[in-house]
Image: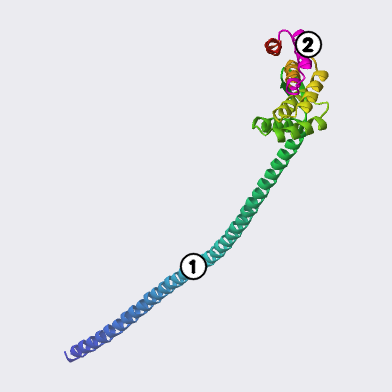
Amino acid sequence: MKCVKTMSLLFSKSSVVFLICLWSVSGLHAALFEDDEARKAILDLRQRVEVMRADADQARQARQASTQELTSLGKSLLDLQRQIELLKAEVATLRGSNEQLMRELSEIQRQQKDQMQALQARFNKLEPVKIELDGVEFLAEQAEKQDYETALAVFRKGDFVKAQGLFSGFVTRYPASGYVVPALFWLGNAQYASRNYKEAMANFRALIAKDPEHVRTPEAVLSVANCQLELKDTKGARKTLADLVKAYPQSEAALAAKERLATLK
């Protein structure tokens, strides 16, 4: 009995020791298990940190690359802007040069036009022109035409003294002109109006001798008779009038001559 109690007591103690050992082993295993999990968690965390760090490095590198690209792009834009400004300046310079060239060209064209007009005017003065006067056509120089028209304008104004000088000078300068016969006619009339009857008669006779068939010739013959009458040469005037009627019977001057002859009888 005593022995059984002793054995029971030993058994109980052994159980307790066993249990204590078992608990110790279980705790150690649990501690070991927990260390592996922690280590694994730490490793996972480290891997995540490394991944995040790598991502951050890539992001930083990407930002740096973007910054560099933006900087490069900004420089390119600045260069482009400078080039644009230079081109604008060149265009403005070219536009100014073009405008200057256009002004110079316009001035040259104007000068050429003026020169051409001046040359044409000089050429026109030198080039003979076709004239039709008193039923007669002829060529005359511009200066010749101008001198005759100037003298005739003075005569029509009634300045017979000045007209005499102009027509006399014309006949001297242009002795072969188609204007000579009309010029002699108006010269004789200007002298007649100034009472220079002898000079007038001489020029009328010069006209008759130069062109007996001219339309002014019958009038010139009648004017000779009038000069003779003014000079009291009635006999000579009668003969001149009779010759006029005989030579130019169909002319108005012949009719006037007949009337004059009737008054002289």
Residue 153 image offset from top left, x and y in percent: 67, 31
Question: Compared with residue 49, is residue 229 higher up or lower down, i.e. above or below?
Answer: above
Question: Compared with residue 91, is residue 147 higher up or lower down, i.e. above or below?
Answer: above
In the foreground, 225 or 33: 225
229 with respect to 18 (left or right) = right
Residue under label 1, please give it.
63
| Magenta stretch, residue numbers | 227-250
Residue 111 image offset from top left, x and y in percent: 70, 45
Residue under label 2, please give it.
243
- Does any portion of residue 160 appear in the rendered image? yes
Residue 41 image offset from top left, x and y in percent: 38, 74
State which quarter of the image contains the N terminus: bottom left
Label 2: how many Cα within 10 Å (few below 14, some 14–19, many 20+) = some
For badge 2, the amino acid type reads Asp
Residue 86 image offset from top left, x and y in percent: 61, 60
For badge 1, the amino acid type reads Arg
**Overall secondary structure of the magenta section:** helix
